[in-house]
Image (cartoon, rainbow, N blue to C red):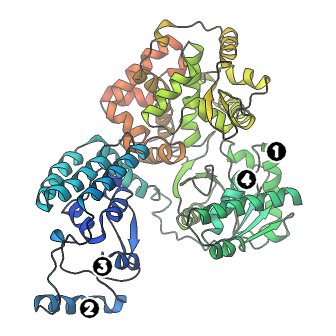
Amino acid sequence: MACHGRISTSTAQLGLPELRLGIIPGMGGTQRLPRLVGLSKALELMLMSKSINGGEAYALGLVDAIVSPDELVKTARSWALDIVESRRPWIRSLYRTDKLEPLGMAREILNFARDQAQKQAAKLQHPLICIDVIEEGIVSGPLAGLWKELDSSRMLQSSETSKSLVHIFFAQRATSKVPRITDIGLKPRGIHKVAIIGGGLMGSGIATALILSNFLVILKEVNENFLQSGIGRVKANLQGHVKKGKMTQEECGKAISLLIGVHDYEHFKDVDMVIEAVIENVSLKQQIFADLEKYCSPHCILASNTSTIDLNSIGEKTMSQDRIVGAHFFSPAHVMPLLEIVRTQKTSSQVIVDLLGVARKIHKTPIVVGNCTGFAVNRMFFPYSQAAALLVDHGLDVYQIDHAITKFGMPMGPFRLADLVGFEVAVATCTQYLQSFPERCYRSMLIPIMLEDKRTGESSRKGFYVYDGKRKASPDPDIKKYIEKSRSISGVTQSPKVIELADKDIIEIVFFPVVNEACRVLDEGIASKASDLDIASIMGMGFPSYRGGTMFWADSLGANYVYSRLEEWSKMYGDFFKPCAYLKERATRGISLSAQANQAKPRL
């Protein structure tokens, strides 16, 4: 932007994405962009880290001409000579004012931008600092703006937010690099046709994600009513994209034409991959995979979208365990950016490489993990709700916990999340963890008691909250009777220390067990690196990105601090808080939790 002219191809991508890293555009970016495209558009591009193509940039005035790639350098040379020899104007972008609004209007635009920034990212300071820097240049002149930009940039580069966001930037790009899988010369095979079994919320979401990326999709359901419901969900998902301006009606029609609905397996003979997305029932999944082995070709990948069930159990009735893999999408599947790829000890490396290729095509960030109950994401976070339930049984208010957790940066607290997921699902998944990890589970009777009274969460408009016709949540005084009954059954009495907990203590009691379980996941080789768990916690569970993910955040506090707090609570409340050997060793030796070490034989 400091050049006297800019030539671009139509497909080039231009933007100032620095706010994604917790900093602001430097080298005069905050001052020159408003002078080239106008204040409103400049604010949009910077605050949203939005990129535009060359054609849009030309329409805005960011570039001066659009040419083909073959002519780019030749045209640029010609323009440069013309400028030097005065055949074209010598324009200094820093001193242009023709695109800037009058001062009064500019201040209104800036104040509106501040209001929006505070609504959308209330806990972040760098968007507001960026607006202040832009305003300085408009009010006091571009040189004053440059000095403020320089000072602000230096300050932000050393901030905890920037360190966290830079960590996430690199961690996200490292998830597709998996030791002994992506470094042995394998290339993804062509996956073009995918079958999905089950057209519920997950199955229809997965189908939507695939057809949006031009995959041919076969959607199977048990009867015509269920099938039409599934197809209807896909159409509704696509119409949502149309309403948001993400696609045209014509593109929507083209996408839906890639979807074929069926009732049997006859159309599965030439599919490249099948994704099973039925209810969490082991025997049903076993039967499906046995059927798939009969109808699908020998090269077809057999994937399950299960979120907790052991893949070895699902595939135990087949002879094709080398091509059975977990493809765990997060709901809603066409929106959430994470794909958890789960490998058993028998899954071939080629299948994993193929699925990494699919993830890239459907614009998902993949993490490759080993096989266990809950895999990496859900296993890491199973103590999250249990710790919250423990606090309630010991006397803390449900809504105080949710408030503290959302104030920390989570999109919702553990009890609002339980309402959203549904109590039946919560009980079923809790049962899985009780069976697999009985020594470190806290079993609260609160949700089962509420289920007995036909409170199932948001779906019944009554859970920990009550919901109006627009699904707006409000606290419900009636839950006190369920809490008292739960305490009575558990034999727990109110603890004065718990009732007086500050938000900081609530956050640590809820999240340190999550960190502890993440340490076990690393130690067992379920995940190959801590940064994968950071990405998983952010993209799968909504952990605030500006804190860098669970492991990065824990390291910012120190392994010894996390260990000592868990040790303290384990003496007060039992083995639920007992620090694992990995965490104890790191704390004792003064090593960060994220540092690579000699792991157990990895389950990858």
Q: How far is the residue under mark 1 from the one under mark 2?
A: 66 Å
- What residue would you read off at disc 3? 63
Q: How far is the residue under mark 1 from the one under mark 4?
A: 14 Å
Q: How far is the residue under mark 2 from the one under mark 3?
A: 13 Å
SS for callout 2: helix
- What residue would you read off at disc 1? 283
Residue 504, given in percent of the width and then of the height, sits at 40, 24
Position of residue 468 relative to residue 31, above or below, is above
Of circles 2 and 4, which is in front? 2
Q: Please tell me which residue lies in front, 46 or 188.
A: 46
Position of residue 32 relative to residue 347, above or below, is below
Of circles 1 and 2, which is in front? 2
The residue located at (31%, 77%) in the rendering is 61
- What residue would you read off at disc 2? 75
> What amino acid type should be assigned to the residue bearing mark 4?
Ala
Residue 18, given in percent of the width and then of the height, sits at 30, 57
